[in-house]
Amino acid sequence: MAWIGIGRGLPVLVALGTTPFLLHRLEVDRWALYTLALSIAGSFGILDLGMSAALTRALAERIGTSEERDAAPLIIAGLTVLMVVGLAGAVLGAWFAPTLIDHLLTVPTALRSEAIAAFRVLALAAPLIVISGALWGVLSAYQNFRAATLINIPVNAVYYVGPVFAMLIGGGLIGVIATLVAARLLQTMLSAALVLRLVPQLADRPRIELRRLRSLLRIGLWVTVSNTLWPVMLYVDRFIVGAALTLAEVSYYSTPLDLVLRLLIVPISVAAVLFPAVATSHRDRPDRAASLLGTGSAVALSVVFLPCVLLAAFADTLLSLWLGKPFAGQSAFVLTVMAVGMFLNCAALLPSTFTDAIGRPELGGITILAQVVLFPPIVYIMAVRYGIGGAALAWSARAAANCAVRLLICRRLGPRAAPVVPGLAVVTALGVAAIVACALIGPVPARAGAAAVACVAIPAAAAALLLDADTQAALRRRLARIGRIARGAPLQPRIRHPHG
């Protein structure tokens, strides 16, 4: 889990550092197109067909058993279908680019040709994104997170530094998008080499056995629905803002949204470890599966609370230091509201992962389907009436409803996990209340003091309500040891017993 967090977190720091430069060089309209391009790249995940999660679950159940010999045929069958689907997506994306620019977005005439060309270059990333996602699913099943992270760190850094070099050599928006595609190509090639080391039977060129797809598609059918609709939920609102308002307001809305979305690296990192572990233990060791849910939720919410409360309480100050006072004046309220919504999104992600891992992904798919139907019209109405602040309120309200539904589903499905869910609901409610309270306090010193107290109280509540007795005891021993080190007291040597 730590390796996944490092691999996703370091590039975020690079992204934060490069954003002011890119925003200045691209200017507001091109920056809006760039953020929309990133959204489209994320939406290419809908072509995954649930294959990455299906491969993770299918391989995790087979590793260490006689059925592990099926690993290579499963991987080959999945990658073959994804390559075909990804290429089809690239062709459709290139063909649809003029329609997107001319009819769905308000793009200045002077930028039309450049925007169409850039989005057509972006379409080349479609097969790379779905293939690299499936390869990551294989690596997750084998829990080989360290090696995968050592590959992804430099590649993801190129994903954010590359656009800077493109702008320095005068590549414009097209050059910026081309560097994103090149980074995806490098990531796919390196991931493939790592999977080949884990499953050397792939080098024997096993036959493409499409019959293997039946089991994968059975697992991934509803995961496909979720993967198709989840990017829509993440990115559709900014397109609605672009249609209802202006490209400039898309920039003021999407920049704080992109900032808070970076925080998803925390629950996603935990979920990447939780999914294969729960998939292998929920039948024979349901108590362990419940413990994993509680521990993962405690870690994710404790870590993500600090940036959420800081972003909400000091939105104007942070945006002013980062992008300047005029930009902050337009986006501070949006950032405050979205920080609350992101905490709720993080709280919902692990219960969703748990239900997928125990073999009930259809419930998650139905939940997202309901959001796709209800969310866009609400965002449009709020954006037209109240501007980007109204759209942000709609976004966070959807996050709250999603969190409540996910918790209820998880409680009904996992009898052994049911005791964990009320604790998770309480911690989530306390966290939201603390974030809102800190944002509403007027004087800066009082606000900072309240945030400091909350950053201790919320993790403490998470540990008390979500960790099992053994994990709490281990945590107390670790904290006591840290306390002795801080005081300079001599440490007792750890005694290893020969029989346990």
Image: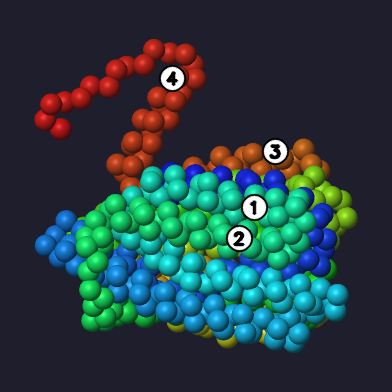
- The label nearer to you, 2 versus 3, is 2
Q: Which residue is label 4 attached to?
A: 484
Is tag 2's residue or tag 1's residue first in the polypeptide sequence? Answer: 1
Q: CA distance from mark 1 to mark 4?
A: 46 Å
Residue neighbourhood size for the residue with mark 3, other residues' Cα within 10 Å, grouped as few (<14), some (14–19), many (≥20): few
Q: Which residue is label 3 attached to?
A: 449
Q: Does 500 appear above or below 178?
A: above
Q: Which residue is label 1 attached to?
A: 162
Is tag 2's residue or tag 3's residue first in the polypeptide sequence? Answer: 2
- SS of the residue under disc 3: helix
- SS of the residue under disc 2: helix
Where residue 140 appears, as percent x and y from the top left, is 35, 57
Q: Quadrant location of the C terminus?
A: top left
> Residues at badges 2 and 1 in contact (C-beta under 8 Å)?
yes
What's the residue type where badge 2 is placed?
Leu
Where residue 353 appears, as percent x and y from the top left, is 40, 64
What's the residue type where badge 3 is placed?
Gly
* Residue positioned 34% across, 36% down in the render: 474
Residue extending farthest to the right is 326
* Residue positioned 77% across, 56% down in the render: 170
